[in-house]
Image (cartoon, rainbow, N blue to C red):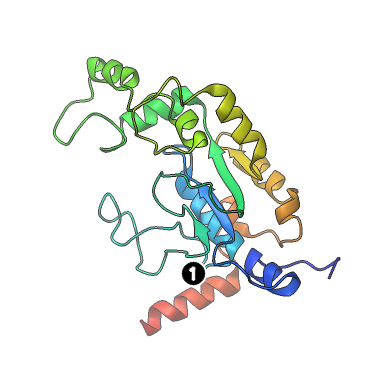
């Protein structure tokens, strides 16, 4: 067993300690920081199928962003939404992004990730209003401490030292600006070192066998 490699966390747990928990992984999805790609990786690590898709609830928000009805993964805490939950003992993973780039990307996305609502213009005044709003300030800090991404910023509760302490305690975090290097480091992390690397974690298509399986499923469906 010591030298064995497993296709995913589910197989690893079943082969070593037995599948004792209904949750294998905790995904902290920082909005506009590669959170959809993170959920693709989380599903792949945990062994949820079909492979190569993010967690999402059909038809998605915005509508049409979720392509299938079978993409939720009960093995992953936080597989959707931006509400972190650190109460379990499963390994925590997340991805980070340059704060300026993240803020600009969120501003031009859709509500509730921005203060700009449908039909309104993305003006400079709106951008200044957005970045100064307690709701949209310090998203990463708030989520690392355990708050919903868009809760009002609390200077007493949402402190940088507390956020740093959390970041140092989690199993792995990737950088959205360095996706391949981050995924390589993922498979060097103790919790995931015995897993076979999955192509989707590197932004590649699912394996041929899995792709063929999906094609057959869609044909039968």
At 52% from the left edge and 26% from the top edge, which residue is drawn?
Answer: 98
Depth check: 209 or 166 in front? 166
| Residue that extends furthest to the bottom in the rendered view of this protein | 220
At 71% from the left edge and 61% from the top edge, which residue is drawn?
Answer: 195
- Count residues near mark 1 (Cα–Cα under 10 Å), then give few for <14, some for 14-19, many for 20+: some
| Residue that extends furthest to the right in the rendered view of this protein | 3
Seen in the picture, residue 18 relative to 112 is either above or below; the reply is below
Residue 65: image location, x then y, percent: 32, 54
Residue bearing the label numbered 1: 50
Residue 79: image location, x then y, percent: 46, 55
Secondary structure of the residue carrying tag 1 is loop
Seen in the picture, residue 180 relative to 145 is either above or below; the reply is below
Marker count (numbered): 1
Image quadrant containing the N terminus: bottom right
At 55% from the left edge and 55% from the top edge, which residue is drawn?
Answer: 42
Seen in the picture, residue 165 relative to 125 is either above or below; the reply is below
Image quadrant containing the C terminus: bottom left
Q: Quadrant of residue 107?
A: top left
* Left or right position of 34 against 121: right
Residue 212: image location, x then y, percent: 52, 76
At 19% from the left edge and 33% from the top edge, which residue is drawn?
Answer: 117
| Residue that extends furthest to the left in the rendered view of this protein | 119
Residue 101: image location, x then y, percent: 45, 26
């Amino acid at each position: 067993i010591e030298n064995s490699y497993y296709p995913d966390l589910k197989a690893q747990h079943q082969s070593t300690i037995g599948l004792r928990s209904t949750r294998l992984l905790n995904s902290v999805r920082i909005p506009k920081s590669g959170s959809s790609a993170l959920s693709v990786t989380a599903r792949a690590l945990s062994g949820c199928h079909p492979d190569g898709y993010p967690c999402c609830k059909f038809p998605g928000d915005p509508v049409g962003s979720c392509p299938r009805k079978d993409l939720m993964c009960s093995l992953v805490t936080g597989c959707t939404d931006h509400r972190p939950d650190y109460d379990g003992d499963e390994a925590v993973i997340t991805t980070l992004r340059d704060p300026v780039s993240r803020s600009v990307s969120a501003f031009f996305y859709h509500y509730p990730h921005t203060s700009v609502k449908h039909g309104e213009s993305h003006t400079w005044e709106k951008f200044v209003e957005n970045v100064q709003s307690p709701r949209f300030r310090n998203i990463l800090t708030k989520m690392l401490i355990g708050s919903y991404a868009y809760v009002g910023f609390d200077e007493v509760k949402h402190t940088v030292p507390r956020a740093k302490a959390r970041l140092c305690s989690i199993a792995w975090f990737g950088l959205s600006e360095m996706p391949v290097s981050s995924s390589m480091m993922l498979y060097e992390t103790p919790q995931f070192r015995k897993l076979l690397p999955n192509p989707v974690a590197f932004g590649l298509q699912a394996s041929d066998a899995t792709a063929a399986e999906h094609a057959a499923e869609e044909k039968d469906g």
